[in-house]
């Protein structure tokens, strides 16, 4: 059945989806002088960059993304005047804490030296691993957050690549001698949502560590919605428009336009394009592999988490997983259709640094672990048990909780297929050529993909949208 055309205001360019990549694409097209209309199915813009009172009135929770290491170092987002639109970054004293069972913790500070001191005997190995890249981060990030091609700084990028392409298990054992150092590195690498024995898992760890020293891991004051609001307002200042509650089921609903950019994943593109897609391209999209899912719990708290290692209160993010071996087991399990008994848990505590997130004297926190794509079990108790392991008495701090499993994630944002928050597995085959070798371009004239299912990588940096817009602009010129 053919769906009716949508009644839309005139525009040169239509963007479907108002996540950070969709908005980045819209801003870039508007900067180039095109009239732009963004269509968003939800009542609020932002995709994975939204906030809401998920638990109790006055407690503001980030629904999906929360910590913006990649946004502040993004060559595109970092150059936008978002502060003039009210965006304010909040920087914890430490980007990260990784507690251990003995009550100690390793912390990731802005200073490489200060971080190295928390790693004890592994401090020298850590410095050797990251220092060559911290001083040249601005150059390196231009190639890290770019699609495949000739790097702007080939020797620097090649040196980085020799380490980044290695499995995290291999690089951890090469630079760290103690269980603490190896566990600390494994926690960073587990952001890849891949088994840590896989190639390229070191890349995520290195990028996150180096970015912490170069730019930090901030929160957006008032919640992640503040970042979206600033991007929307900047787009509007350029003449662009965003239309809420406008779901696009089929490309046939759109009026004839010169350019359409889709902030969607391959599965949605197949549905939206229907029989217009050539069979060969459709088959490539159907082979695209989605990654592990996320299972998340948000809490309204009477008081902060009572960490055994008190220095954990300095950190915005915590990695709860102990040793390299434990984290490896946890990250391997989702790819075997299982959940580890003690899963690696990412925990954030934004209200310690941003009091606008909760009523006076109260706090918010959230945590998630990785699960099989489409997982339907209940892991709230398992996650809270893992938090209690490093913060005894945490359950007594809880006033209310909100739970989001993979199904809830996908219901909230249709890009999160089976709870996959990365737009597809970032394994070696899909890290560079995603979703196909044609990257942003599709076989349909004037139709481009601009989601995190395209290069350079998952993360809130807007570069997927920026490069998709550049591809479209090149075609239009």
Image: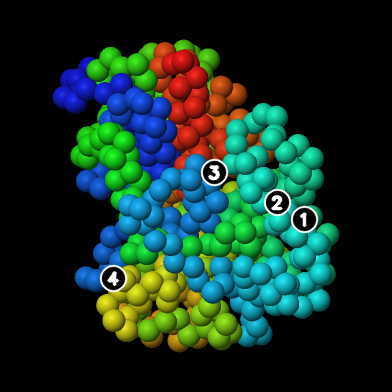
Closer mark to the observer between disc 2 and disc 4: 2
Q: CA distance from mark 1 to mark 3?
A: 20 Å
Q: Which one is earlier in the sequence, the residue at label 2 or at label 3?
A: 3
Tell which circle, 2 or 4, labels the residue nearer the N-terminal end.
4
Whichever of callouts 1 and 3 sits on the residue coming sooner in the sequence is: 3
**From where the camera sits, is residue 95 visible?**
yes
Question: Which residue position is annotated with label 1?
Answer: 132
Disc 3 target residue = 75
Q: Earlier in the sequence, mark 1 or mark 4?
A: 4
Q: Disc 2 to disc 1, how far (Cα)?
A: 7 Å
Identify which residue, 436 or 393, lies in the foreground. Answer: 436
Image location of residue 298, percent across then percent down: 37, 67
Q: Measured from the top left, where is residue 332 in percent x and y?
A: 63, 54
Disc 2, disc 3: CB below 8 Å? no
Q: From what the image shows, is residue 107 above or below residue 77? A: below
The disc placed on residue 136 is: 2
- Tell me which corner region of the image, top left, top right, bottom left or bottom right, holds residue 301: bottom left
| SS class, disc 3 | loop
């Amino acid at each position: 059945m053919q769906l009716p055309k949508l009644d839309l205001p005139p525009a040169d360019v239509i963007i479907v989806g108002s996540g950070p990549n969709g908005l980045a694409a819209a801003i870039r097209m508007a900067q180039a002088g095109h009239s732009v209309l963004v269509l968003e199915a939800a009542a609020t813009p932002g995709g994975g960059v939204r906030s809401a009172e998920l638990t109790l009135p006055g407690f503001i929770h980030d629904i999906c993304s929360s910590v913006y290491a990649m946004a502040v170092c993004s060559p595109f987002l970092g150059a936008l005047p978002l502060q003039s639109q009210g965006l304010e970054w909040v920087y914890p004293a430490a980007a990260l804490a990784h507690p251990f069972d003995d009550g100690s913790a390793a912390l990731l500070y802005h200073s490489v030296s200060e971080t190295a001191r928390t790693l004890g005997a592994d401090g020298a190995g850590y410095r050797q691993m990251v220092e060559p890249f911290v001083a040249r981060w601005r150059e390196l990030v231009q190639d890290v957050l770019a699609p495949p091609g000739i790097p702007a700084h080939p020797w620097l990028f090649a040196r980085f690549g020799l380490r980044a392409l290695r499995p995290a298990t291999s690089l951890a054992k090469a630079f760290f001698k103690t269980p603490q150092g190896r566990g600390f590195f494994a926690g960073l690498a587990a952001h890849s949502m891949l088994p840590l024995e896989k190639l390229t898992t070191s890349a995520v760890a290195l990028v996150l560590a180096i970015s912490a020293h170069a730019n930090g891991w901030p929160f957006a004051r008032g919640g992640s919605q503040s970042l979206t609001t600033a991007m929307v307002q900047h787009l509007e200042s350029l003449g662009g428009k965003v239309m809420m509650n406008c779901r696009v089921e089929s490309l046939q609903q759109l009026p004839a336009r010169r350019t359409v950019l889709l902030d969607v994943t391959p599965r949605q593109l197949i549905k939206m394009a229907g029989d217009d897609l050539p069979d060969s391209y459709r088959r490539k999209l159907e082979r695209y592999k989605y990654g592990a899912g996320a299972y998340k719990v948000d809490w309204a708290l009477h008081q902060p988490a009572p960490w055994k290692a008190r220095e954990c209160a300095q950190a915005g993010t915590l990695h709860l997983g102990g040793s390299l071996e434990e984290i490896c087991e946890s990250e391997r399990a989702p790819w075997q259709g299982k959940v580890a008994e003690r899963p690696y848990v990412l925990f954030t505590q934004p209200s310690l640094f941003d009091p606008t997130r909760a009523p006076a004297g109260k706090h918010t926190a959230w945590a998630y672990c990785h699960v099989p794509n489409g997982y339907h079990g209940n892991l709230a108790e398992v996650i809270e048990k893992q938090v209690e392991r490093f913060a005894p008495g945490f359950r007594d701090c809880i006033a209310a909780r909100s739970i989001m499993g993979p199904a809830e994630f996908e219901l909230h944002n249709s890009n999160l297929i089976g709870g996959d928050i990365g737009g597809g597995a970032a394994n070696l085959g899909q890290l560079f050529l995603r979703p196909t070798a044609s990257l942003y371009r599709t076989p349909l004239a004037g139709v481009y993909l601009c989601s995190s299912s395209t290069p350079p990588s998952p993360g809130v940096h807007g570069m997927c949208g920026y490069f998709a817009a550049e591809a479209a602009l090149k075609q239009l010129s």
